[in-house]
């Protein structure tokens, strides 16, 4: 090998050795001049989770104290439904109970438009009836019934015509209640065909009785006493015919109490009408 080639090779080897020895020193010196640390973010730059601003979902196994679990909500709903059902039942009773319904009607209806009549045998006579009214009722076959019928309806009025008018109107209302009783008897189960036929005759008779009372009321305008007495007499006949039908069947009449009451009231009307000029 020539001398200059040998020197070139030595030079290359020397460079390699120097390079190898210098590399660790460069890596070791690098940490001595690090980049300055970044400042920590201030409180205004903190990152917040939006989840904290929303209520926990219903699937959260541990809901906060401020919320209600599904079981609590159901219990509350069931309790409310129970209360509403109780109130509804009370309201329904208030509407369908006949006694409560009558009390409600009497409390909101004026005596002039919906009088309350007490026509039973237990009705109490007025303590001090008007002398003129008492004299009129004393002329009837049933003076006590007359007084208990007309006194609540007169409202201070006196005179034969006033007493007769309220007596006829009260009898008309009673005839309507008797007619309703006939219809109720017709609808009962197990009624024999013969009984149904008799009840039909009674229904026709009470229907006509109601019409006759209304014709009597209309006759007041013309003071047609003849028509009044004719219509009233026919009512007594119709009621009697109905009762005769049950007697012929040798069956007790389910309408006997109403028939006796209506006959007595109508008889009083006839007696009072005889006092009209």
Image: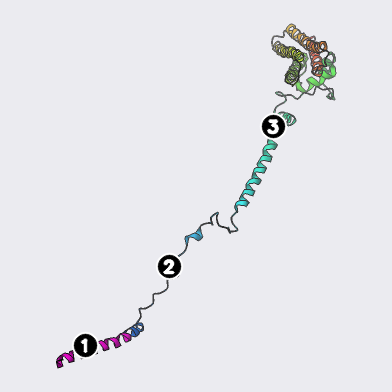
From which residue to which does the magenta span run? 1-25
Spatial distance from mark 2 to mark 1, Cα to Cα?
A: 57 Å
What residue is drawn where x is 71% and y is 34%?
A: 93
What residue is drawn where x is 71% and y is 28%?
A: 105
Q: Nearer the viewer, residue 224 or 57?
A: 57
What residue is drawn where x is 64% and y is 43%?
A: 81
Q: Could you tell me which quadrant the N terminus lies in?
A: bottom left
Write down the residue under mark 2: 45
Spatial distance from mark 3 to mark 1, Cα to Cα?
A: 120 Å
Q: Check if residue 273 falls in the magenta segment.
A: no
Write down the residue under mark 3: 95
Q: Tell me the chief SS of the magenta region.
A: helix
Left or right position of 241 against 215 = right
Write down the residue under mark 1: 12
Q: Could you tell me which quadrant the C terminus lies in?
A: top right
Q: Residue furthest front?
A: 1
Packing grade of label 2 (10 A; few <14, some 14-19, many >=20) is: few
Please, what secondary structure does the residue beneath circle 2 have?
Answer: helix
When asked about the image quadrant of residue 84, the answer is top right
């Amino acid at each position: 090998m020539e001398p200059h080639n040998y020197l070139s090779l030595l030079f290359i080897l020397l460079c390699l050795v120097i390079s190898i020895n210098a590399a660790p020193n460069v890596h070791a010196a690098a940490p001595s001049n690090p980049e300055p640390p970044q400042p920590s973010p201030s409180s205004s730059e903190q990152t917040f989770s939006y989840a904290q601003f929303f209520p926990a979902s219903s699937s959260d196994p541990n809901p906060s104290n401020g919320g209600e679990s599904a079981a609590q909500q159901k219990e509350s709903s069931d309790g409310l439904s129970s209360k509403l059902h109780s109130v509804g039942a009370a309201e329904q009773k208030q509407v369908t109970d006949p006694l409560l319904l009558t009390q409600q009607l009497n409390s909101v209806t004026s005596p002039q438009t919906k009088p309350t009549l007490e026509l039973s045998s237990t009705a109490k006579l007025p303590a001090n009836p008007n002398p003129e009214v008492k004299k009129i009722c004393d002329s009837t076959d049933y003076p006590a019934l007359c007084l208990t019928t007309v006194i609540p309806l007169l409202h201070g009025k006196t005179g034969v015509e006033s007493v007769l008018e309220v007596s006829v109107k009260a009898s008309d209302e009673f005839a309507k209640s008797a007619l309703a009783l006939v219809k109720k008897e017709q609808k009962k189960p197990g009624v024999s065909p013969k009984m149904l036929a008799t009840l039909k005759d009674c229904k026709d008779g009470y229907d006509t009785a109601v019409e006759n009372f209304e014709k009597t009321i209309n006759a007041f305008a013309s003071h047609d006493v003849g028509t009044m007495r004719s219509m009233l007499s026919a009512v007594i006949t119709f009621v009697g015919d109905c009762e005769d039908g049950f007697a012929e069947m040798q069956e007790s009449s389910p309408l006997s109490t109403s028939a006796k009451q209506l006959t007595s009231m109508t008889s009083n009307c006839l007696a009072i009408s005889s006092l009209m000029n």
